[in-house]
Image (cartoon, rainbow, N blue to C red):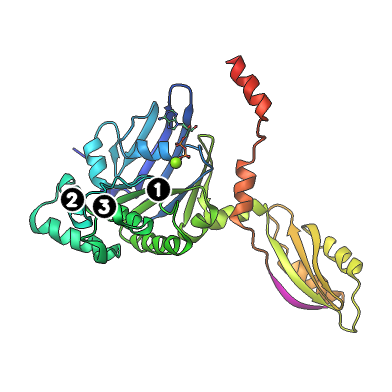
Amino acid sequence: MYPNPCDKLSMITVKSLTKRYARTTAIDNISFEVQKGQIVGFLGPNGAGKTTTMRVLTCFIPPTAGTATVAGFDVLEHPLEVKKHIGYLPETPPLYPEMDTAHYLTFVGKLKGLSGDDLRRRVDYVCERCAIVDVKNKLLGKLSKGYRQRVGLAQAIIHNPDVLILDEPTAGLDPKQINETRDLIKSLAGDHTIILSTHILPEVEQTCEQVIIINKGKVVATDSVHNLQNRARGGESVLLEVAGRNGTLDSNSVQRKLEQVPGAGRVLMKESGGNRMIFEVESQKDRSIRGDVARAVVEAGWDLNELRPAAVSLEEVFLQLTATEKPTAVEEVLAKGAE
Ligand SMILES: Nc1ncnc2c1ncn2[C@@H]1O[C@H](COP(=O)(O)OP(=O)(O)O)[C@@H](O)[C@H]1O
Ligand SMILES: [Mg+2]
């Protein structure tokens, strides 16, 4: 008996997956899960192993070790079932330049086992959904990159798969096309579980709920975007605007006062406008300092005009997690010689 995918909360389960090419270990013992209905960002620099992982998940290449299941089906044991449940948009969409959009989608639909009215309805539906109705009769070779990418998405969802795997779906698009593609992907999230890869941070911050950060073939973090930002901070960090009541405010006094707040870490003056100053106070790990910061300011006789959490961009998290000493060109040559 095949497992019933509806019973499973986890739509993608990857356990200790390794893929080695001749000399390269592209992915090295990675594990993660994607829950049903989630939209997950697979984030990592070029060469991290994103495409390799996606090609294993979509049954294009076998893993060297470990297991991967999609909708409950193992990629090695039940590849046909896996493919039925997956829509895949590779880095370069597999479009035939001499075919027009409608014929191409009909062709892909047939490959996915659709026929007759069902197939016609699905072609119409995905054209509406991906906003490509106006290029239905145009040759794929004549489409702009933005349209080509949307046709790529249309072919990925033609058979209404549970899972969508999108490899760098916005790479090479202009800003307007990026926004359109992003909105389209977000709108698909309700009906599908989505995993999309990117090496660009804002992509994840704007599109995804969960993020899996991968670097040099290893998962270095998997969490919600929100939690990752908190983790990067190590604690909370607050911004506050302080004003003096009698027209003068001594920045050194404020600095000292804030440093004395229980749980406070680094204190930085961000702006100084005479009687008003903006400070950032970092907390020590896992300490909440907002209440004590407010009390300290007010008890010192100053006005607290504003107090809010300081935003940490995912950029910082990403850099922290993927920071590695890069070998110099000379070291690389030496290492190659030693092999
Ligand atoms: N077919 C292949 N043969 C040999 N090495 C490969 C092949 N495909 C990818 N690699 C290597 O595996 C590593 C991971 O590549 P890839 O999965 O494409 O990363 P990403 O998609 O994150 O940029 C890289 O070092 C890359 O050079
Ligand atoms: Mg890639």
10 Å neighbourhood of mark 1: few (<14), some, or many (≥20)?
many
- Find ligand 1 in the image and state its quadrant: top left
Amino acid type, callout 3: Gln
Do the CB atoms of the residues marked 2 and 1 lie less than 8 Å apart?
A: no
**Residue labelled with disc 1:** 34
Q: Earlier in the sequence, mark 1 or mark 3?
A: 1
Question: Residue 6: where, in percent of width, then height?
Answer: 26, 51
Q: Quadrant of the image for the C terminus?
A: top right
**Residue labelled with disc 2:** 109
Residue located at (62% from left, 20% from top) = 335
Residue ranking furthest to the left: 116
Amino acid type, callout 2: Gly
Majority secondary structure of the magenta segment? strand
Question: Residue 209: where, in percent of width, then height?
Answer: 47, 57
Q: Give the range drawn in magenta.
A: 302-308
- Mark 1 lies on a secondary structure that is strand
Amino acid type, callout 1: Val
Q: Which of marks 2 and 1 is nearer the N terminus?
A: 1
Q: Is residue 137 left or right of residue 48?
A: left
Question: Residue 162: where, in percent of width, then height?
Answer: 28, 51
Q: In this view, does 96 lie to the left or right of 25?
A: left
Q: Camera-side residue: 190 or 147? A: 147
Query: Is residue 304 located in the magenta-colored stretch of the structure?
Result: yes
- Mark 3 lies on a secondary structure that is helix
Q: In this view, does 31 lie to the left or right of 159?
A: right
**Residue labelled with disc 3:** 155
Do the CB atoms of the residues marked 1 and 3 lie less than 8 Å apart?
A: no
Residue located at (64% from left, 52% from top) = 316
Q: Does the residue labelled 2 lie within 8 Å of ligand 2?
A: no
